[in-house]
Image (cartoon, helix red, strand yellow):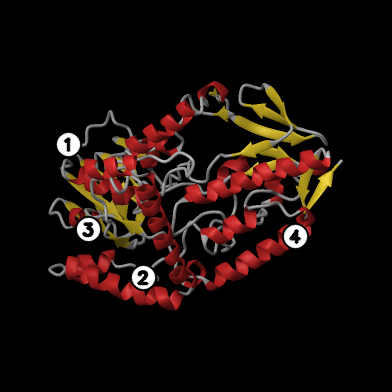
Amino acid sequence: MLEKADTLGGTWRDNVYPGCACDVESHLYSFSFFPNTEWTRTFARQGEIRSYLEDVADHYRLRDRIRFGAQVTGAEWDGAAWDVTLGDGSTLRARYLVLGTGALHEPAVPEIEGIERFAGSAFHSAQWDHTVDLRGKRVAVIGTGASAVQFVPAVAGETGHLTLFQRTAPWVLPKPDKPIRERTRRAFRRVPGLRRAYRTALYWRHEAMVVGFLHPRIMRLAERAVRLYLRRTFAGDATLRRKVTPDFTLGCKRVLMSNDYYPALRRDDVTVETAGIERITEHGVVTADGVEHPADVIVFGTGFRVGDGLGRMSISGRDGTKLADLWRDGQQAFHGTTIAGFPNLFTVVGPNTGLGHSSMVLMIESQLNYVLDAMRLVDADGAVAIDTRSDVQHAHNADLQERLGAAVWGSGGCASWYLDEHGRNRTLWPGYTFSFRRRTRRVDPAAHELLA
C-alpha cells in the first residue's frame, strides 16, 4: 500500500481544526468487520475516529504493508500490468491497481485578488495553523461549508471579533449528539447483538431519508419544519434570520448538522456578511459595497476540489488513452469502481459513489467486495486482466444522470460541489446503499471483457 503522507488517517489525519467531528453516527461510521463498542459520543470527534483507524491498522498489522511518503504521480498499462511512478522517480509494477485517493482531500482556496498582500495569517481549515493564537484577534472566515459550521462555534468565543463571509447560506439542522454512557458501552460489550441491533436501526433510519432526496416534493414538506425551526431560533432578529435562510430546496446541497452554529452567529462579537468579496488588502477584506472589514487572521472554510486527485495523475490505459483526456468532459466509471479502457484498475470512492444521506463506509465496503470478486473472476478464467465494456459504462452513466436530474440535487435550485463544470452530478449515488450493494455483490461477466 502506498501512502503519500508520513502517517495513516486520511481526512481524519489532515483535518484537525477546532470542533472537527463526523456528521454520521459513530456506530454507523465504522467498518462492519471491526465494530467498536467504546465510542464515547453519538457522533465521534476527529481524534477518536483517527484512533479507531489506527486500531484497525494495528489489529490487521497493516503498517508493515504501508509504504509511507510514497506519492503516486502516474501509472501506465503495458498490456499485462501497471507501471506505477512515484514522486521520487521510482517505479513499481503491479498486476492490479486500486486507487483509494478519496474525494475530499485537496483544499479549495479561492483566487481572491490581493490575498498575497495580506499581512496577517491565512490558512484553509484543512491546513489549520495551531501556532496562530486567535485570542482577541479579528478573524475573517470565508465560506460556510461543513467545516466552517464546526469550527466557527469552536473559536467564536475566543476571538476578538469574527466576521463570517457567506456567499450561500447552508441548511443546518440540530445534531442529536450526546455522550454514550459507560453502562451503554458495557451493554454493547456484553451483548454483541444489542450493538448490532443499534447499528441496524441507525442504518434503516438513514436509508429512509433517501425518499426525500429522490422526490423533491417530499423534501419541500420537510423543509417547512426546518423553516419553522429557523423562525424560532432567530425570533428576535429577522435580519439575521433572512441572511441564514437558504434560497434553495433542503437537500440540494449537503445538509449540515450543528447545535451551536446558529447560537454562535447570534453573538454580539460575530457578524455575518453577505456582500460579495471584491479583494483582500494588507489589513482585511473588502466587499462589493466598498467596505473594508479589518482582519488579523483569515480562515478559508471553502471546502475541497472534489475528485481532482485522479485527474491530476498521469494515468494511461489501453492504447495509451489518458484518463485526464477521457474525463475532460466529466468523470464517469462503472459502479464508480472500474473504468472502460483501464484494465485491472479500480477506484474506491470513484464517480457517483458519494452519499448525501448515510455513511460512506457502506459504499467503500461494497466497492471492495466488487474489486475482490473481479480479481477472483480473472484468476478463475486464467485471464490477464478484466476491462469494462464501454457501451455498458455509457448506458450505466446515462441512467445515473437521468435519475439524478429528477432528484433534489438536480432540481433544488442550487449550484453545489456535487455538480461538475458541465452541470452534471458526478458525485452522488442516486439511491439506497442496499441497492448499490446488490449491484456490486457479484461482477457480471457480460458487462466486462476478460483479456488473455
Q: What separation in Å lies between label 1 and label 3 (alpha carbons)?
A: 21 Å
- Given this view, does label 1 or label 3 mark the residue nearer the observer? 3
Task: Give the residue number, with chain letter if any, for mark 3.
Answer: 262
**Hey, what amino acid is under mark 4?**
Val
Task: Give the residue number, with chain letter if any, for mark 4.
Answer: 392
- Residue appearing at x 48%, y 47% in the figure: 361
- Residue appearing at x 18%, y 56% in the figure: 263
Q: Position of residue 265 (x, y in %)?
A: 20, 56
Task: Give the residue number, with chain letter if any, for mark 2.
Answer: 247
Task: Give the residue number, with chain letter if any, for mark 1.
Answer: 135
**Hey, what amino acid is under mark 2?**
Asp
**Label 3 packing within 10 angstroms: few (<14), some (14-19), many (20+):** many
Q: Position of residue 21 (x, y in %)?
A: 33, 44
Q: Is residue 63 visible?
A: yes
Q: Reading the chain from its start, which is encountered first: label 3 or label 4? A: 3
- Given this view, does label 3 or label 2 mark the residue nearer the observer? 3
